[in-house]
Amino acid sequence: MSEAIRVLLVDDHAVVREGLRTFLELQEGIEIVGEAADGEAAIREAERLGPDVILMDLVMPKLDGVGAMRELRQRLPACRVIVLTSFAQDDRLLPAIQAGAAGYLLKNVEPSELARAVRAAHTGGTLLDPAVASRLVEAIAQRPGEEPRERLTPREREVLSLIALGRSNKRIALELGIAEKTVKTHVGHVLAKLDVPDRTQAALFAVREGMRERGAVDEGPRRNH
């Protein structure tokens, strides 16, 4: 008999994790080996438990799903991550796919589809929610020949310019009047959209593109978000 697929559940809502565990533990060949409530804990638990598949939310405290996936891809490249989220917008979908998601499902997914996604990910396949797949095709079609800097939102461009000036996440948060965890989210999106591995490479990109000066960032009145 083949070994069960070892699954780690990552979501900041305990009720979501409980629901996932209740359903998946009834599925033949799937074993829930642990849970985590944020991206940082997910990395620690993944290194400790060595799961085959991780079901991961995107919006979490401390470190979001995209940031956690980027880190896991470096530390545990064999581990497959399925995004399970409420969001299908481009600013979350594309960075998650670029970070190596082995599936992208919305939280209203049918339970049977969720189990199928876990099995598909474990065997090297990818399963996308139909609405997500359609949105992904549209997003790619809208971006022929688009320059990397054009993929960034105005806020992401401003964060990138401050990275190029050597600012820490804490300093960026103070200068922009936003939470440090929000800065971390923006930084993760910038790295994914520019397809660079770290802040240093992002800073070099900004310098090459003339985005190092604050005035080079084209943005309207600042808003906290």
Image (cartoon, rainbow, N blue to C red):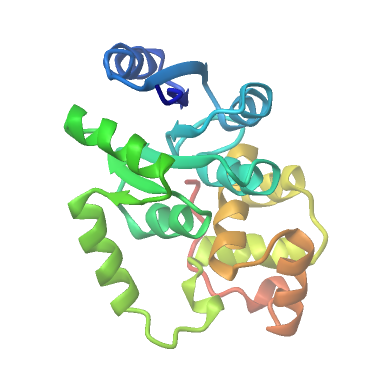
Residue 167 quadrant: bottom right
Q: Residue furthest right?
A: 166
Q: Residue at x 43, y 23 (%)?
A: 4
Which residue is nearer to you in this view: 173 or 8? 8
Q: Residue furthest bottom?
A: 145
Residue 207 percent coordinates (x, y): 76, 78
Instruction: Tell me if residue 205 comes above or below residue 158 in the rendering.
Output: below
Which residue is nearer to you in this view: 35 or 121? 121
- The quarter in which the N terminus is drawn is top left
Q: Residue at x 40, y 43 (%)?
A: 121
Q: Residue furthest front?
A: 1
> Can the viewer see residue 88?
yes
225 sits left or right of 90 in the view: right
Residue 224 percent coordinates (x, y): 50, 46
Q: Residue at x 61, y 64 (%)?
A: 158
Residue 152 percent coordinates (x, y): 51, 68
Which residue is nearer to you in this view: 28 or 205? 28
